[in-house]
Amino acid sequence: MGEKTQRNLYEAFVGEAKAHRRLLAFARKAEEEGYPDVARLFRAVAYAEGIHADMALRLMGEAVVRSTEENLQSSFERERFASGIAYPRFIQEAEEEGDRRAALVFSRARDVEEAHAALYKRAISCMLREEPCTYYVCDVCGYVAEGEPPDECPVCGAKRERFVRIE
């Protein structure tokens, strides 16, 4: 694959992934405002944009799916990279540029990525023991709690009510 095509696939993936998430946010707002038909349209187009992102990801070789145990190990390693290398650099550069809001977003994401890595490690042992797991996600910062949600998010301080059970 040519260099330009690789770059274009990456740009396509980023654009499609951003559109997917943006449209899901638009759908939530439409639901809140009492427009269920518009919300459905946003979700339908978001689904389509997700398909486009998946296709680009596969062509880039990033969507290689292996055994569940291998996928958990790969996910663990990616989270460790994000929390240990990528986000610390993002935080430092945001602080150097005086952008406190971005530094806070990056700091929270780093902390959540560390927790994700631990969850992946525990999931491997739960999978091998065939134990069921229940997860709750803080809808403010993305922290994932296993078992029961905490009274307060350890990353952003959000109350227990802000945790969503993942089915």
Image (spheres, helix red, strand yellow):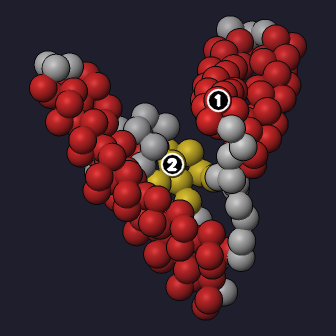
The quadrant in which residue 18 appears is: top right
Q: Most extreme residue toward the bottom, as rendered?
A: 129
Q: Where 160 falls versus 4 (above or below)?
A: below
Q: Position of residue 59 (x, y in %)?
A: 75, 46
**Residue 166 pos. (x, y %):** 63, 53
The image quarter containing residue 107 is: top left
Residue 12 in the figure: left or right of residue 150: right
Q: Earlier in the sequence, mark 1 or mark 2?
A: 1
State left or right for residue 129 relative to residue 54.
left
Q: In front here: 164 or 17?
A: 17
Q: Residue furthest front?
A: 2
In the rendered image, is residue 13 in sight? no
Circle 2 — which element?
A: strand
Q: Residue at x 53, y 73 (%)?
A: 73
Identified at 72% across, 43% down, the residue is: 1
Q: Which residue is mark 2?
A: 137
Residue carrying label 1: 4
